[in-house]
Image: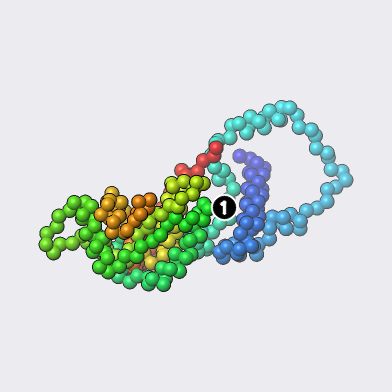
Amino acid sequence: MSKKAGKKRRQRDVGACDVTRDRVRAHFLDGQTGPWARKLGAEPSATDSADSTETAPSNDAVPSTPTSSSSSSETAASAASRPVGPDYSVPSSIDIVADPVLHAISTRRSISKLGPETPNDADLRELIHAVSSVADHKGLKPWRFIIIRGHDRNRLGEALDEAGNVQRKTGEINEKPLRAELLLALVASPQDNPKVPEWEQHATAAGAGHLLELALWQAGWGVMWRSGNLTNEPAVRRLHRLKESELLMGWLYIGAVPERYRQRLPNSTRPLPDPEQFLDTL
């Protein structure tokens, strides 16, 4: 690539970045979404920069010539040869580290070994109140949570044993529900609505569960979403007093994040997947 071509390429990239920045400014600044958006708002926009540097054309400017048919053919051929797929040529202006919401999303981890401390019921109500903003066609709120603490965890273990036809020796118990002091059962509870199919309401319930995971993580709590083949067996459904139309989507195991894990977290090297595998165009 010649120096001249390289300079033109850099100029195009800068212009594309300015366009993206202006779009982000227009979309987010009214709500001041995160510190990165506020920082973006303080920067001069591409339009402002253009206004300050633009000069009037001289009288001896050479008029442009009409586009020839050969140029049109070359343009069409170039467009046809473009690869199909997402366009990553425009640099992103989103700062995942600076924005607390995006940072919580990108750093969330499932914690299998949890400490005994848990959020209290008042904290849970506040967080569940916040996640009720989940995308919800017709606002049906087709989900609910069931709090499971103390001896109720043993009752869940007994129901799981009954569902799995497990016979234990005297004094033995199913210790799986005891891996956390607090469990939240997530129940999809579809409502009758001709415009919202059941699968869509299940998706909303799953979204509420994942949002609650993120909210708990951002509030400092560890979470592990567990389920299994026995989740909707009759004995387990009976314990949770489910209606026939309801679906148990598993349990959020909630507790304190162990200090040894907190110390490792800043240096965690688990890479996030390449987003290209999840994107395509029609």
| 66 relative position to 243: left or right | right
**Relative depth, front residue between 57 and 18:** 18
Q: Quadrant of residue 205?
A: bottom left
Residue 35 location, x and y as percent?
56, 65
Where is residue 111 shown, x and y percent of the image?
A: 34, 61
In screen coordinates, is 209 left or right of 31?
left
Residue 41 in view in this figure: yes
| Image x and y of residue 102, in percent | 50, 59
* Mark 1 Cα-neighbour bin, 10 Å: few <14, some 14–19, many ≥20: few
Please say which color scheme the image uses.
Answer: rainbow
Residue at x-position 61% and y-position 39%: 1
Front-most of residues 99 and 74: 99
Residue under the point 62% across and 52% down:
20
Q: Number of callouts in the render?
A: 1
Residue at the outermost right position: 59
Residue 163's x, y, as percent?
A: 23, 52
Q: Is residue 107 visible?
A: no
**Of residues 193 and 6, which is closer to you in this image?**
193
Residue appearing at x 28%, y 56% in the figure:
238
The residue at the point 40 percent across, 54 percent down is 188
The C terminus: image quadrant: top right
Q: Is residue 88 left or right of residue 126?
A: right
Amino acid type, mark 1: Ser
The answer to whether 273 is drawn above or below residue 28 in the figure is above
- Secondary structure category for the residue under label 1: loop
- Vertical side of 89 occupied by 53: above or below: below
Q: Is residue 205 left or right of residue 48?
A: left
Q: What residue would you read off at disc 1?
A: 92
